[in-house]
Every structure is written in structure tokens, then in C-alpha cells.
Image (spheres, helix red, strand yellow):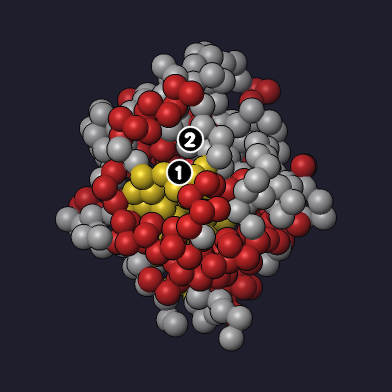
Amino acid sequence: MGETIRVIGVQIDLGAGRRGVDMGPSAIRKAGICQSLRQLGYGVVDDGNIPCDEPEAHQIRDPKLRYLPLITETMTSLASRVEFALERAEIPLVLGGDHSIAIGTIGGVGGHFRKADKKLGMIWFDAHGDANTPETTPSGNIHGMPQAVAFGLGAPELVTIGGFAVEESKLDPANSVIIGARSIDEREKDVIRDIGLKVFAMDSIDRRGIYEVTREAIEIASNGTDGFHLSFDVDGMDPSIAPGVGTAVLGGVSYRETHTMMEMVAESGQLVSMEVAEVNPILDVRNQTAEVAVEMVASAFGKRIL
């Protein structure tokens, strides 16, 4: 293929309510992510990990924005690394870590696209909406906020990552979708409606099938854009497939459905960046979740049955 993928790990669990996802990048690497991508013909540069302090060493200053200063610092560093990869015509693949990593990834991709006068789409695969704000959050956990931040809502320290102004959106809601949602907080629903996000919840997948849902999602994310970012939270899959996650929700997307979605992403030729969030080895069974995540990433980058 000739393309190069830059793998960037983020050892962070400050945004989550349970410990352990900071070990996700190591688990995914041990499951063979770099080898799998090289076998598909990609050049792979492993950029190592962006470290982050553990929460025990710090006090929570704002219970509605837990560990905000540390998360801001880490996501600013991530955004810079992502933008560096894109400047080199590489595809950034970010390994988390909790889903606050999307703040840095989308900040970096969005900043690069804006400088190049390009438009970015997004597909967000997740059991949750992750669209809370400091006003709506029931927990104060920032991993429940990155979707809102991407659309200019939330703490200015986070919204401005990537060179954006306060309240400035990095994405157009008309080119952004959520797939697999089945657990959205009550006040968060209003945020999603106000943003204008298209949500393919599990009932849509049940009734229409993953092929039709993914086809429409790719069409939305690609319409008038120069490619899309795929944010892949492994808890979008059913816990029977991916048990090693911090916020498991029953009734998720099946193994083959997820593969089908990823295969269609690869066929679209529109994937410009990707992240994998919320692999928690502490809660996993023999690294099963990381291994499944590697399989899905490989499908998104072109691995096929035949």
C-alpha cells in the first residue's frame, strides 16, 4: 500500500471513573497491532507513549472537571503529535487510554484540516454519547465529554486545543454520526439534540442492520468532506466480545457486525485518522479485548477474509 501509519499511545485513565485503561496501549501492542498493520503492507512508525501522572499524586480542583489541568496538558501534547503525523502525510492511530484521548486526536486532526482548508467528517462508535458538559455531567469524568468538546462545548482549556477559539467547533454536525449508542445520560440527550448529531442507536442497528446503518454513516461523514476520523470505543461492542472495558453495557454490536462496519470503512477509502479507546486490561480476560480491538483496526485498514 505504501502508506505509513504512526501509532501513538496515550497512558491516561484520569478521565475515567475506574483505573486501568492507562495500560490499554501496552495491551494493544502486545496483541500485535504493529505486526498486523505491517502484514497489510503499511509502513508503521511506533511513536511510543505520551505518559500521564496517576491520579493519586494530584488533588481534584473541580469535581465537575476532574483532573482538568493534567488532561489538558496530555491532550495538548497528543494534538501536536497527531498534527505532526498528518503533516508528514501519515495516518495517526491513537491508542488509549480513556476516551478523553478524542479531545487531543480531534484537536490535532481538526487543526491540521483547518490549516489546509479541508473539511473533516467523523464516525463515533460507542455505547455512550460522551457529549456531557460541566453543566450536565453526573460524574465529572472528562471521558464523558470529548464529543461535546469537539463541537465547541465545555471547558475552554479543552475546546481550544488544536488552535481553536472558545466555543469554536472542530466538526460540522452534518458530517458527524454516532453508531452503537445505548447508554446516554438524560441531560446529555439534550446536548446531542442541540448539536444536531445523527445517532444510530442499537435499535437502528437491530431494525435496519449494520450494513445499511454503516452505509448511511459513511455517506454522512464523507459528504463534502476530505475524509473522516473514526473514534472507536471498544465498549461499543457487546461485553461478551469485549469484557475488558470500564463502562460495559449489555446489548452491544456483535463481533461480525463490528467487522462489517470496519470493512466498509476500509472500502470507503475516506479514513484519515483513528483512535482506540477504553481497553482496560485489569478487567479483561487473557487480553481478549485488546486482541479483538487489533482485529477490528486491521479490518478498518483493509484486512479482508479473502
Extreme bottom residue here?
A: 306
Tell which of 119 and 206 is nearer to you.
206
Of the image marks 2 and 1, the number of the one nearer the N terminus: 1
Which residue corresponds to mark 1?
Answer: 102
Q: Position of residue 229 (x, y in %)?
A: 39, 55
Which residue corresponds to mark 2?
Answer: 130
One can see residue 45 in this view: no
Q: State which quarter of the image contains the C terminus.
A: bottom right
Label 2, residues with CA under 10 Å away: few <14, some 14-19, many ≥20: many
Taking the spot 70% from the left edge, 33% from the top edge, the residue there is 19
Q: Is residue 291 above or below residue 180?
A: below
Q: Quadrant of residue 46?
A: bottom right
Q: Amino acid at mark 1?
A: Ala
Extreme left residue here?
A: 117
Q: Position of residue 247 (x, y in %)?
A: 65, 36
Q: State which quarter of the image contains the N terminus.
A: bottom left
Q: Is residue 77 above or below residue 152?
A: below
| Number of numbered discs on residues | 2
Q: Position of residue 166 (x, y in %)?
A: 25, 28
Q: Position of residue 89 (x, y in %)?
A: 34, 68
Q: Quadrant of residue 241?
A: bottom right
